[in-house]
Amino acid sequence: MSLGAEDTSLIDRREFLWRFGGGLGGIALTHLLATEGLLAAEIDSSRAPPSATTAGVLKGLHHPAKAKRVVQLFMSGAASQCDTFDYKPALIKRHGEKFDPGEKVELFQSNPGNCMKSPWNWKQYGQCGKWINNLVPHIGSCADDIAFIHSMISKSNVHGPATYMQNTGFVLPGFPHMGAWISYGLGSLNNNLPTFVVLPDPRGFAPNGPANWSSGFLPAAHQGTMIRVGKPNPIFDLFPPDSAKFITPQSEKDGLALLQKLNQQHLATRDGDSRLDARIASFELAAKLQLSAPEVMDLSGESDATKSLYGLDEKITGDFGRSCLIARRLLERGVRFVQLWSGADNGFPRRNWDSHEDLARDHLDMATSMDKPAAALIKDLKVRGLLDDTVVLWTTEFGRMPCSQGAKGRDHNPFTFTTWLAGGGVKGGVSYGESDEWSYKAAVNPTYCYDVHATVLRLLGIDHSKLTFRHNGIDRRLTDVHGHIIEEIITT
């Protein structure tokens, strides 16, 4: 990069816009109209997105939106559908009998054992009378707000690829997360916080680590911003180290201004490289985050009743409860997409949902830590009037087998599992799709992540087939060449 004398014939972007765009007032008005989706309702996905700004690539929405934001709860390790939401009386009746679905059963790491009923009982919840396992009673209390999808299928029974699939629509790495696609399409609702925020499990990462919330081939500015809840430094490099006592607010401001000037000159000679553009945007956002992030993370202003609702006063629910409460604070401040993780891939003893050895032990810990906070998030959003335009999405990478592994565990099951949605335009108290009598395979309305992704985008006002990005000669999209909107779970 040349650091020679400044070329006075060059002007920066702001000066260009001031001279030729009719002034910043007109620009601000245009930006606000675009942010609210009030410009022409069409898309120009062939143009480069303004990745260093808060605007999205869409000129306007394809449909009237029922929601503005999304919060995704991901159960890493594979939560068992037949111990949570998929009630099967036949499985209970056949407990201890040979598991024989009439075909050869190939499992991930075991041979099929006998039919194994859930260690916990089932109960009907809500006015809809939904049968839900007593392992998750707090979510059960929200049954009338939830649409359950019981016929989910994965294309892999390996954690890494299956986790990629649920997040990006592909079993291979290198593709953008749904949150990155939504950031790319719609942009931000807030200039002082990231558009896409990820709250990992405080105990560690899920399989694939931060690659799960990558922007893939989309401009790098759309990747998820990780906040490590409960850590002394929740956002890396947000503040200068203790050793940098010489840094003052004014010197930091001057340094950032010089760095931005040099970066802009460097960027001007490398058109089409989004990495530096994203870095410039990150520096601008970091300066704002130094003020906004501490306020979001500070829970001292929350009432004792709210903290108790999320389980912050209990050891087992404290971590996930804190993440859920911070997620609510992020959402109400305009963060477009928040992802929370339950489960870490960090060996033994297991701290995720991958219950091969002892399902009653491992699922009890994981479900107890998740159930109350997740239900609290739904209830709190509802009380605050935010649930009406916020989609809550609960999912996992695949399910677990209805037969035993060893004496007390369950092996991987990619053939059926349960996902549920609530809020923003979602019809509550309904179920879509069915597994077979064993909860072994999807039997009615087989559903893939593409269908869920298409439905979420539809709730946000986006036609999933029109949100595209040209990459290596292909018009890529979140749903690949698939995707059917699940109309049965959308309110009219």
Image (cartoon, rainbow, N blue to C red):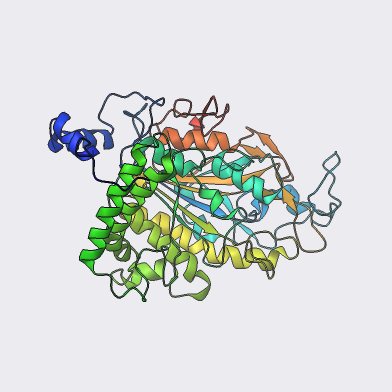
Q: Is residue 188 visible?
A: no
Number of numbered labels in the structure image: 0
Q: Is residue 387 visible?
A: yes
Q: Position of residue 304 (x, y in %)?
A: 34, 73
Q: Position of residue 24 (x, y in %)?
A: 15, 38
Of 171 and 398, nearer the camera is 171
Quadrant of the rendered structure where residue 348 is? bottom right
Q: Residue at x 55, y 41 (%)?
A: 168
Give above or below for 420 relative to 323.
above
Q: Position of residue 207 (x, y in %)?
A: 62, 55
Give above or below for 344 relative to 80.
below
Of 85 and 466, nearer the camera is 466
Q: Residue at x 73, y 51 (%)?
A: 412
Q: Residue at x 42, y 72 (%)?
A: 232
Give above or below for 249 relative to 222.
below
Q: Position of residue 23 (x, y in %)?
A: 13, 34
Q: Quadrant of the C terminus?
A: top left
Q: Is residue 211 left or right of residue 269?
A: right
Quadrant of the rendered structure where residue 44 is? top left
Of 470 and 412, nearer the camera is 470
- Furthest-front residue in this view: 4
Q: Quadrant of the N terminus?
A: top left
